[in-house]
Amino acid sequence: MEQIVNYFALHPAVLGVSVIVAAVVMFFFLRKLAGLLLLAAAVVVLYAAWLLFSGSDVSPLFHKAEGWLTTALQFVSSLFGS
């Protein structure tokens, strides 16, 4: 590990290129993740619309997911809140 740190300390251009490549990889990863989350949200909305029009009951799995999501949002808000 020290050899890598020393190499980057001696070659700042390589460090700069490595940081740029890492940033580009993270950007594309987060972009794909956002698209996947958007697709999942669209499927949930379509399922909710289907339940509304068909008059069916909501699956117990969605009640558990709602509880988990509420807990996760409270945790995130406690991290960034006052």
Image: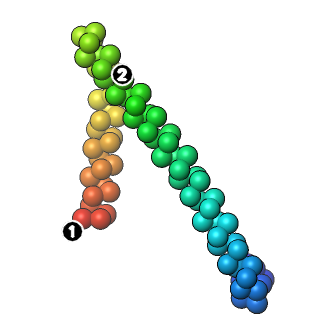
Quadrant where the image shows the N terminus: bottom right
Q: Relative to 29, is 46 above or below?
A: above
3 relative position to 19: left or right: right
The one of 59 and 38 positioned closer to us in this rendering? 38
| Residue 76 shows in the view | yes
Q: Quick one: SS at disc 2?
A: helix
Q: How far apart are marks 2 and 1 (CA)?
A: 36 Å
Quadrant where the image shows the C terminus: bottom left
Q: Quick one: SS at disc 1?
A: loop
Amino acid found under the numbered disc labelled 1 = Ser
Where residue 29 appears, as percent x and y from the top left, is: 58, 52
* Residue wearing tag 2: 47
Q: How crowded is mark 1: few (under 14 residues within 10 Å), some or many (20 or more)?
A: few
Report the residue at 73% width, 82% height from top: 13
Q: How crowded is mark 2: few (under 14 residues within 10 Å), some or many (20 or more)?
A: few
The furthest residue to the left: 82
Question: Residue 14 occupies which quadrant of the picture?
Answer: bottom right
2 or 1: mark nearer the eye: 2
Q: Say which mark, if any, is on residue 9.
A: none
10 relative position to 22: left or right: right
Report the residue at 55% width, 46% height from top: 32
* Residue wearing tag 1: 82
